[in-house]
Image (tube, rainbow, N blue to C red):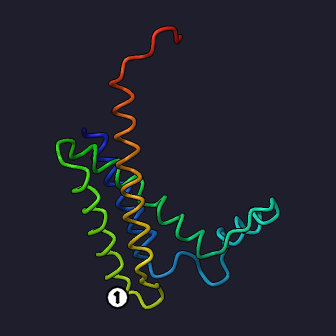
């Protein structure tokens, strides 16, 4: 449990850095998202920036769902998802009120909550698999 608390604390620091910093890169900085989109486009996978950002927001909150579920093992899944929604709402409100260079968007709220739900689901599936007996004849 101590290791999980440490991981969660580190995750929260990283989450704050990604979501609450005035700018992620300076104006002349390396645009990783643009580079990834260009690379994917060269492979024939055409994603828009908006879709990529939505998927990234989902991925950003998957660890939240996993770690909070581990820290609150006796709490129902819906409560963990509600905590993800509340955390995302606080972030979006802080961006709206205090960070003029950031964009507060309801789609981020949806994606972050979805990411939390995915994290909860991943952990639930992993727990079920670890409890189910291995089928006879597998090695």
Q: How many numbered dots are placed on residues in this image?
A: 1
Q: Position of residue 35 (x, y in %)?
A: 72, 68
Foreground of the two, 133 or 7: 133
Question: Extreme top residue here?
Answer: 137
Can you say whether 99 is above or below 29 in the image? below
Q: What residue is rendered at 73% in x and 68% in y?
A: 46
From this view, report whether residue 6 is shown above or below residue 42.
Answer: above
Task: Tell which residue pokes out farthest to the left in this image.
Answer: 74
Q: Position of residue 1 (x, y in %)?
A: 25, 38
> In terms of image quadrants, where is residue 36?
bottom right
In the displayed structure image, the side of residue 103 where residue 29 appears, left or right: right
- Report crowding for label 1: few under 14, some 14 to 19, many 20 or more residues within 10 A (C-alpha): few
Q: Which residue ends up furthest to the front in the rendered image?
A: 136
Given residues 119 and 18, the one toward you in this image is 119
- Image position of 96 with respect to 128: above or below: below
Which residue is tagged 1?
98
Horizontal placement of 83 versus 74: left or right?
A: right
Residue 97 is situated, as x and y percent measured from the top left of the image, at: 33, 89
Q: Residue at x 34, y 70 (%)?
A: 88
The quadrant in which residue 16 appears is bottom left
Q: Residue at x 39, y 35 (%)?
A: 126
Spot occupied by residue 40 in the image (x, y as percentages of width and height): 74, 62
Q: Is residue 109 left or right of residue 59?
A: left
Quadrant of the rendered structure where residue 112 is? Answer: bottom left
Q: Is residue 104 left or right of residue 34?
A: left
Q: Secondary structure at mark 1?
A: helix
Residue drawn at (35%, 60%), measured in percent from left and top? 12
Residue 117 drawn above or below residue 98: above
């Amino acid at each position: 449990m101590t290791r999980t608390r440490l991981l969660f604390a580190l995750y929260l620091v990283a989450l704050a850095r990604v979501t609450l910093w005035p700018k992620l890169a300076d104006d002349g900085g390396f645009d990783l998202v643009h580079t990834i989109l260009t690379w994917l486009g060269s492979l024939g996978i055409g994603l828009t920036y908006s879709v990529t950002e939505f998927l990234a927001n989902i991925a950003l909150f998957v660890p939240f769902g996993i770690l909070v579920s581990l820290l609150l093992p006796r709490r129902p899944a819906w409560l963990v998802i509600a905590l993800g929604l509340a955390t995302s709402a606080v972030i979006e409100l802080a961006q709206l009120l205090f960070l003029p260079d950031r964009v507060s968007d309801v789609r981020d709220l949806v994606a972050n909550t979805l990411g939390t739900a995915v994290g909860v689901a991943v952990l639930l599936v992993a727990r079920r698999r670890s409890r189910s007996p291995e089928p006879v004849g597998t090695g």
